[in-house]
Amino acid sequence: MSSPILSFEDVNVNFNEVPVLKNFSETVNQGEFFSLIGPNGSGKSTLINTLMGTVKLASGNIYLDGKNIYEYKAKNRARIAAVVPQKFYTSFDFKVYDIVMMGRNPYRDRFASVTQEDVDQVEKAMRITDVYKYKERKITSLSGGECQRVVIAAALAQTPKLLILDEPTNHLDLYHSLDIMRIIKMLNKENGLTVFAVLHDINSAARFSDRIAIIKNGLKINSGPVNAVLEEKTLREVYNIELVVRENDILGAREIIPIRNSKGSVVNKNKRIHVIPGGGSAALLIEALHSHGYTVSCGVVNEGDSDYQICISLGLEIAREAPYSYISDESVSRNKDLINEADAVILTDTPIGNGNLKNVEILKSFDDKKIYLVDTFFERDYTAGKAKSILDSLILKESVKQISRDSLIDLIEQEKI
């Protein structure tokens, strides 16, 4: 197991006697990519400023490479930890090469000449970050992404053990944000550089981090491996939004999809809605129902279907079936039990074939159950008319309503289901 390079022990920081950080404790191990996330104003940047000595501790301790930070002189601390700020400012129009050479200041006396070691480290840092081609250009002539790579190069020229990032992509577009994060992850994996990053973008934290801590109102909410920390319940409470957490198979990482600000109430908690989904047709309806406080169940849904994934993600009761399988009698029985418990049923506009025809047939058993049929269904009957025949008979019932998807969403939003 790697040894710690950075440790926070019961860190407390006050501004004008108002607590900003409260008993924050955490350890960052050598060689890992550790990210700190949380809402604006939660104390993330304050923690970095305290680490670098620009903000004083009210109480607690911070240890850097085994020593209390207050035991270091500024130059000695800079040889171990380098900081990449949110945005770089300079009063002078320096050349790019000169900016990166400033990263060697911790190793040089004020009027000392540049050594060959300085030159070698600066060139190496500039080539890693792909800014060597800009070495004669003025820093003010570069784009935001190019400038941020120069700042990273200057930090690397310090040859630190620990790279500290304070929202390094906050002012960049998607292209340059990904470019910066790619470089940092490469340095972490290939060069063994430890990274401690405050990140605004939760998806970047999920994709690039080994471990994550969440902070809100100065308090640590949770920390640990990415998949253990980035859970929907926690993130909803921390950020006060409705969201979905799912696995992105392309990236091999968790992905957070924000949907809407949290309503902050659960007015329909005792009203149960059963959704008959399939083929990804129900995700929006399920999320809308869940976010408005309805108790939602689903079935029969095939394992691996995107509708199945959102049901599992939200912790819903479901009737499930194996992938690419016909619906079994056992699954039908489970589905029937869930429908019996529900106040209303929604049949989505999923394609119906012989494999899932039982999802339609089951509705014949419920004479007085309120049922909503999403009306584009009739274009998706692949049962030689069997499904349509069942639906034609259902529509004659007073308790059954054919409805468009948009109208159904409106009813959910108005909490009138």
Image (cartoon, grey):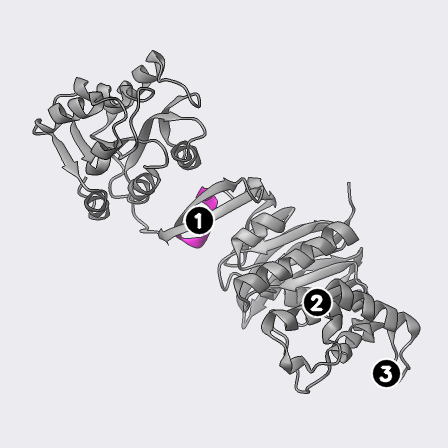
**Mark 2 and mark 3 in contact (Cβ < 8 Å)?**
no
The residue that disc 2 covers is 152
Going 71% across and 59% down the picture, which residue do you hit? 62
Distance CA(mark 3)–CA(mark 2): 23 Å
Q: Nearer the viewer, mark 1 or mark 3?
A: 1
Q: Earlier in the sequence, mark 3 or mark 2?
A: 3
Mark drawn on residue 110: 3
Going 24% across and 40% down the picture, which residue do you hit? 268
| Furthest residue in direction front, as rendered | 384
Q: Quadrant of the N terminus?
A: top right
SS majority, magenta: helix
The residue that disc 1 covers is 257
Q: Quadrant of the C terminus?
A: top left
Q: Earlier in the sequence, mark 2 or mark 1?
A: 2
**Mark 3 and mark 1 in contact (Cβ < 8 Å)?**
no
Q: Is residue 346 left or right of residue 284?
A: left
- Picture coordinates of residue 219, whole percent (x, y): 54, 54
Distance CA(mark 2)–CA(mark 1): 29 Å
Give the residues drawn in magenta, as a range: 232-241
Distance CA(mark 1)–CA(mark 3): 50 Å
Going 41% across and 47% down the picture, which residue do you hit? 243
Q: Nearer the viewer, mark 3 or mark 2?
A: 2
Q: Is residue 226 left or right of residue 193?
A: left
Going 23% across and 42% down the picture, which residue do you hit? 405
Q: Hey, which quadrant is residue 68 in on the image?
A: bottom right
Q: Amino acid at mark 2?
A: Ile
Q: Is residue 57 visible?
A: no
Mark drawn on residue 192: none
Q: Amino acid at mark 1?
A: Ile
Q: Earlier in the sequence, mark 1 or mark 3?
A: 3
Q: Amino acid at mark 3?
A: Arg
Instruction: Please rate how many residues cluster around mark 1, counting C-alpha atoms within 10 Å: few if below 14, some from 14 to 19, many from 20.
Output: few
